[in-house]
Amino acid sequence: ARQLLVPAPLSSAHPFTATTVATINSRSFTSASIALDMSSSTPSNLPHAPHRYLSRPDTLDLSDLEIRINDADERRQAAYDLSRKVGVALAKCRAASEVGGDAQSVADAELETLMGEVFAANEDPATSSSVGSGDAGDTSSNKKGSKPRDGNLSYKVEDYLRYKSYVHFLSTGRLLPPSLTPDATDEEYLGGACIGLAQDLARYGVGRATVRDVPSVQMARDLVGDVMTYLLQFDFRNGPLRRKYDGVKYALKSLETVLYELSVTGAEVLDGNNKDVEMQNGDDGKNEGCRIPTDELEALHKRMERRDELRERLIKRCRDGQKAAKQSIFALHRNDKKRAEKLIDECEECIKNDLLPIVEEEPRLRYGSFSNVLEELVEARLLYAWLFGKDGNDECPSGTMLTITDFAIHLEPEDYLGGICDLTGEVGRFAVQRGTARDTKGVQMCLEANLSVLLSLQSLSRFPSGGGLGKKMDPLRRSVEKLERMKYEMSLVEATGGTRKVMVESGVKETDSGVCGGGDNN
């Protein structure tokens, strides 16, 4: 390095003087010495710590929510384990039915024990004595066990009802009545005992046709035809039942094809449904001589219609509540505090008076539109408290973050966490207003709020199974990065002496030092 820095002899005509060369040589040598001498590093030679944006070490406390999330996850995992056991027990029952004898009774007893655990896990003691009796005159929308089941247990209940209905047909020639399955929901009964049975009877018909047992094939055809006629009364919306319903048509067609093939090979086949089939094993329902329990199925149909009516009413009222919450957020950005308070109160009243009674009557409507309006209300309440404090008495942004216990309405973890993720988007919009006004402290306050939410969510061991929080994490990270970039660009403006004041209408009180003079979080 010293050899490279020694200048060549200069002539008298050279434009540089000896003093200039010595100065350049000295500065170059000093820089090279610092760059090459790595063995004698000192703390001053090391990089500084990253710039810290949080003024306080603590972040949003989500420990109570994490406990609830972990408990729900444990219940869900237990449900999956129980579901696997039920699946194995059903497979054993079907295998034993091919052999018969004592193995069949042992397998059935094991299955009934497991199903008792399934139904007990979903039973609500407060309502078990008053709803779900399965009587023909029961037209209420609720039924014992109507609360959503954990994991995939509902599908296993359908498989169980499908098996029980098939066994019931073999012993009686009739459809399993809903009164014999009081712990199952109406959807589970339709999916398993009706639609699932049709698939099994199509396979049963092929087997009996192999030994030219025409009467048995006709009984299967007639029952599937009755089920098909009954299901035509329903207006199934797009969903699992609507997709399964198409299989009943194919099952009926398969049985009719088998009977036609038997007829062309010399078997005597009666035309149309066999209305004169004698029922030899007594009557399980109130319609003697009928293959299906007409009265009970009619009551089920009315309950389904009532449930659809509640669903449509809930969706319409949810639109009103969600609209009020969204407009309150717009009002907060326009600094219209009174209108925002009025709209938030309207949303809460809509939830308490119109929506909650529907959800209490039909708990399975808890998720979907109702969950969305709760999430929107959480976002509006959080933004209001962040701007004006928990009690709404602050004139300046306070940075207050409400916890889930601060809400008068019961919230699930996914409702609160979804709302607080959406809050960061509104805080980012507020930061743009403050950045336009050259309010560095206001932008810093927004950055701290979003970064605190991000770090708190990242500290959770797992997210709730519903709510789609995983999809909201990337926008949250980008929001924090944008605010960091905004703060950097504002530092460039300050470094170049840019002090021009820009008047921007926003929802905060202006002072000479920014948003009410600081960015401290309370």
Image: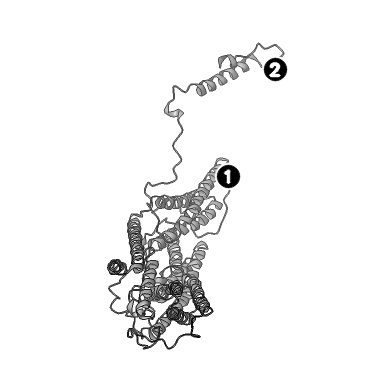
Rendering coords of residue 319 (x, y %): 49, 72
In the rendered view, tell whether residue 180 sits above or below residue 277.
above
> Residue at (55%, 40%) from the top-left corner?
495
Neighbours of disc 1 within 10 Å: few (<14), some (14-19), many (20+): few
Circle count: 2
Neighbours of disc 2 within 10 Å: few (<14), some (14-19), many (20+): few
Instruction: Depth check: give the residue in front, 100 or 321.
Output: 100
Rendering coords of residue 209 (x, y %): 46, 75
Instruction: Depth check: give the residue in front, 314 or 167.
Output: 167
Label 2 – label 1 distance at C-alpha: 41 Å
Instruction: Depth check: give the residue in front, 475 or 167.
Output: 167
Rendering coords of residue 480 (x, y %): 49, 50
| Mark 2 vs 1, N-terminal side | 2
The quarter of the image holding the C terminus is bottom left
Q: Left or right of 5: which side holds 256? A: left
Quadrant of residue 71 within the rendered picture: bottom left
> Residue at (44%, 22%) from the top-left corner?
40
Q: What kind of element bears circle 2?
A: loop
Rendering coords of residue 194 (x, y %): 42, 76
Q: What kind of element bears circle 1?
A: loop
The answer to whether any part of residue 517 appears in the image is no
In the rendered image, the residue lying farthest to the right is 13
The reply to whether callout 2 and callout 1 are in contact (CB within 8 Å) is no
**Which mark, by number, is residue 15?**
2
> Residue at (42%, 46%) from the top-left corner?
54
Q: Amino acid at mark 1?
A: Gly
The answer to whether any part of residue 205 appears in the image is yes
The quarter of the image holding the N terminus is top right
Q: Amino acid at mark 2?
A: Pro
Provide the residue designation for mark 1: 498
Q: Nearer the viewer, mark 2 or mark 1?
A: 2
